[in-house]
Amino acid sequence: MNPRNAAMRPLPGKTSPIAEARAHYAAGRVAEAERLCRRIIARETSCDALQILGGIALARGDAAAAVDMLSRAIAVDPANAACHANLGAALHAAGRFEAAAQALAKAVALAPDLPEAHFNFGNLLRDAGRLDAAAIAYARALKLRPDYIEALNNIAVTLWQDGRADKAVAYAELAVSLAPRTGRSLLLLGEALRHAGRHGDAMRALGQARSRGADPIAVARNLAGILLTQGDADGTAACVEAALADPHAGTPADRARLHSSLLFALNYGADRSAADIARHHRAWASAHHADHPAPAPFANEPDPERRLRIGYVSPDFVTHSVASFIAPVLAAHDRDQVEIHCFADVPRPDAVTLALRNRSDHWHDVAALDDAALTTLVRRDTIDILVDLAGHTADNRLGVFARRAAPVQVSWLGYPGSTGLPAIDYRLSDDVADPEGQADVLSTEKIVRLPQGFHCYQPPEDAPPPAPPPHLANGFVTFGSFNTFAKLSPVTLQLWAAVLDAVPGSRLVLKDNRLHDDVTAQRHRDRFAGAGIDPARLTILRRAPDTSAHLCAYAQIDIALDPFPYNGTTTTCEALHMGVPVITLAGDRHAARVGASLLHQVGLDDCVATRSADYLQLARTLAADHDRRQRLRGNLRGRLAASPLGDRSGFARRLETAYRTMWRRWCAVRP
């Protein structure tokens, strides 16, 4: 985001030197403005000169100096609302949120019609996760100054973060109309369009933003997200690698995040070997997290048998697939053995957030904290075992783990493989997803294989009962996949085309909850047509309004097809819960073997193929066995609930046993 003082406007001075300084500052001649202001304050205490110097310091990232200058300015003129507004921005940048709120409240009280005060208040509220209130503050600033470009940009960002992408687009379009040659406004328009699902329009806006000098790292992040959603893993990787090739593009933190997104995208590509993916992950850690200083000694009591403090870190404590697997564990943990802390990087909490919060012993909202501050918080609470639930997915906090925030650090659940980060000690898996051998060599973490699987699934409470098999009414078999289209690799499309050819009259139903626009839907129809699938045999469903409606769509599927090399997880569990059998192809890496792990837990090993020819034969055989499919429709939900995958208490005990073993090891060899 722009500097917090983007709206700072020094008050006009009455003396010629301050007027000259103000003119230099307004024209961007910062060195001249600073020279004149320092000359002025050497002779006299000038509120205006101190305010300009505060703005310059803040623009340079020196929040402490900005706070000092602006505090001195207020001492000269306590009723100066602009100084209070700018002090609020400086305190915000310094991480002093309560003091910033007080300064901004004072500014609004002194001058309710000062747009900068409302703008800076919006910035503070947005970073505190209060998105509704932030949008209101920006709207007040815009009412006072309708052409306030920065307020237009920031309200657009706030609205799409708050799930109101269509409204965000309207504000972003207005900002572009007022400043059509501004790369930042075009970038934010592209981002808003992307979140609204208008991918074709978004790509055009992002291309214009790039040509207008917008941040190439931010442009690449958005373009890569669109390309991956469209199933173009190779294009995604090429886009990111091109942006990272410029060593001067972006801040180190932004480059690390974009590089992390490249690693996530590599999991989707069928042409990448497991060894190549592992090499890229290690390179990321070396490039961005090799220079952290040695951590300070931990204050944790090294008692191997005491009650443990477990910390779970995630941006996905919301309506998200991760919640379906962490919720039953939080509920089933033995509180005599463990004390649960959840560190939620969630700017937009929802009903699921509240439910998870109620299942934890201690809840920390950390969206406003940077990695250093979050590390300090984890250490302050003397967390014994810190568990990352995100890996290289969006909004991860791997930077906290790189700083060694806790004595024992673990990767689990949210990422399909090794993070590449040496500071993470363990990765939870099982012997199906990660058979002993190559997986251990390629993983930077020690793999801890939980007996009976590393997932525990909680079905949605509002799930409808399984519907009758659709072939009874249709007279033909319908295959389907509700996985994100990003997982539909070219080799997956080719094999699914072969499945349709092998089962005469069969159909294919696809659904992606991220699908909003006709451009993306048509692109996928064209991809399947290119693979030899008759468009008349293909149905693409749009996003459902709620979970129940989404699950009802399984009534249209007889057999679910798992994509590869990146298998489904939540979609596989959903299908089983709705009575739909799943066919998977087990590959050479964790991401390509999760399907096998899940099916093994519910006793469907005969639905796991190890070669493409076997996958094709499984589809043909199951399509022809109407009796078996009808039996599965009636008993899969019960089988899942009775399996290790549905045994929350048993899973929690196995997980706690693994945690206890990790902790005993640390106590035995602690530094």
Image (tube, rainbow, N blue to C red):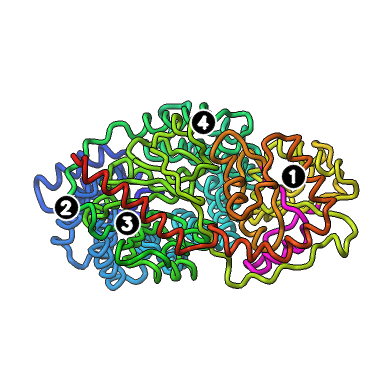
Identity of the residue drawn at 34% across and 40% down: 425
Under circle 1, the secondary element is helix
Q: CA distance from mark 4 to mark 3?
A: 30 Å
The residue to which callout 4 is attached is 277
Q: Which mark is residue 310?
A: 3
- Residue 72 in picture, x, y percent from top left: 14, 56
Examine the structure image and report whether residue 550 is included in the region drawn in magenta: yes
Residue 183, can we see it?
Answer: no
Label 4 vs label 2, nearer the camera? 4
The residue to which callout 1 is attached is 524
The residue to which callout 2 is attached is 68
Q: From which residue to which does the magenta span run?
A: 539-563
Residue 267, can we see it?
Answer: yes
Under circle 4, the secondary element is helix
Furthest-left residue in this view: 43
Q: CA distance from mark 1 to mark 2?
A: 57 Å
Examine the structure image and report whether residue 361 is included in the region drawn in magenta: no
